[in-house]
Image (spheres, grey):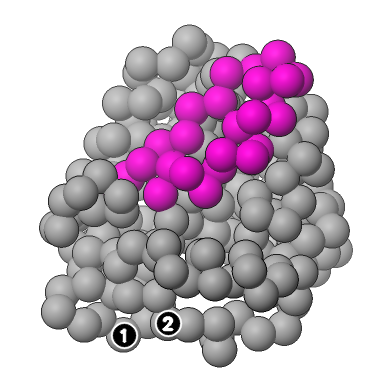
């Protein structure tokens, strides 16, 4: 199966290198996506640009396709299901949740010179980054790509309720499936609460399993495919 891989904030398609290699060994075709404004050389991009790139990748893939979103990019994966519910076989969300219609995409950190730079490891101390060694932290920080303001503050637009028929797997790294299920049941994650086929998958890692647990993450994704 074609597996589209969308990394979260500050990362480009190379974040999936180790996971992609493992997926190929398992018989799948991984397609890491480098998003506009996040590694393609452009200094400006909008959320619409990133959505268009993901939808184009869905259209170019052999259907049905598994669309994988990490962190903030869980919203991009969900937007792909909204745009192409008939081509997306399943959405896998790693360490994040889809934003609602009308909400900003990822307005989480300070904007400097029309871009949202990586804020350093301070905000992620604890379960998020506990499994990242010093070398990995330095590599991620040194290669982090500041996210254009038009992406970070772009407004999410969801239009097709058929997205709720697309099966969803919530891969739980720094939080447990039990915690995630409680958030859904409490109404804290409205998009997932309306999903008709929602599974929870545990993975023993921090927020960036593509770096700390690539083999395990590839096996999880292959099983979902």
The one nearer the camera, 63 or 141, is 141
The one nearer the camera, 221 or 196, is 221
Q: Is residue 65 above or below residue 94?
A: above
**Position in image of residue 15 (x %, y %):** 52, 48
Q: Is residue 48 above or below residue 107?
A: above
**Position in image of residue 45 (x %, y %):** 17, 54
Q: Residue at horizontal 71%, vertical 71%?
A: 133
Residue 76 numbered mark, or none: none
Comes first in the chain, label 1 or label 2: 1
Question: Secondary structure beneath disc 1?
Answer: loop
Residue 27 lies within the magenta run: yes
For residue 181, which quarter of the picture? bottom right
Locate the C terminus and report the quarter of the image it occupies: top right
Locate the N terminus and report the quarter of the image it occupies: top right
Within 10 Å of the Cα at label 2, are there few (<14), some (14-19), or many (20+) other Cα atoms?
A: few
Whether residue 188 appears in this view of the structure is: no
Q: Residue at horizontal 55%, vertical 52%?
A: 70
Give the residue furthest to the bottom. Answer: 122
Q: Residue at horizontal 55%, vertical 82%?
A: 121
Give the residue furthest to the top. Answer: 62
147 left or right of 82 in image? left
What segment carries the magenta color?
A: 12-36
Residue 110 numbered mark, or none: 1
**Inter-mark Cα distance, 1 to 2:** 8 Å
Q: Residue at horizontal 61%, vertical 32%?
A: 20
Judge depth for marks 1 and 2 and give the one in front.
2
Q: Is residue 14 above or below residue 38?
A: above
**Position in image of residue 90 (x %, y %):** 61, 29
Within 10 Å of the Cα at label 1, are there few (<14), some (14-19), or many (20+) other Cα atoms?
A: few
Residue 119 numbered mark, or none: 2
- Asked if marks 1 and 2 touch (Cβ < 8 Å), the reply is yes
Give the residue furthest to the front. Answer: 135
């Amino acid at each position: 199966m074609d597996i589209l891989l969308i990394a979260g904030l500050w990362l480009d398609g190379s974040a999936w290198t180790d996971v992609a290699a493992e997926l190929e060994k398992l018989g799948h075709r991984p397609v890491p996506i480098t998003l506009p404004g996040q590694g393609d050389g452009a200094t400006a991009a909008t959320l619409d640009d990133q959505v268009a790139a993901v939808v184009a990748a869905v259209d170019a893939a052999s259907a049905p396709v598994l669309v994988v979103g990490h962190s903030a990019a869980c919203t991009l994966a969900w937007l792909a299901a909204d745009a192409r519910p008939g081509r997306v076989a399943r959405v896998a969300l790693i360490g994040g949740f889809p934003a609602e219609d009308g909400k900003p995409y990822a307005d989480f950190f300070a904007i400097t010179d029309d871009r949202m730079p990586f804020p350093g490891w301070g905000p992620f101390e604890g379960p998020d980054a506990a499994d990242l060694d010093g070398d990995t932290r330095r590599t991620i920080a040194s290669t982090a790509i500041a996210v254009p303001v038009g992406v970070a503050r772009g407004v999410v637009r969801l239009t097709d309720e058929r997205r709720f028929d697309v099966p969803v797997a919530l891969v739980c790294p720094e939080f447990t499936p039990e915690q995630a299920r409680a958030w859904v049941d409490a109404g804290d994650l409205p998009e997932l609460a309306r999903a008709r086929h929602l599974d929870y998958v545990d993975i023993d890692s921090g927020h960036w399993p593509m770096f700390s647990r690539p083999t395990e993450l590839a096996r999880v994704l292959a099983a979902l495919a």
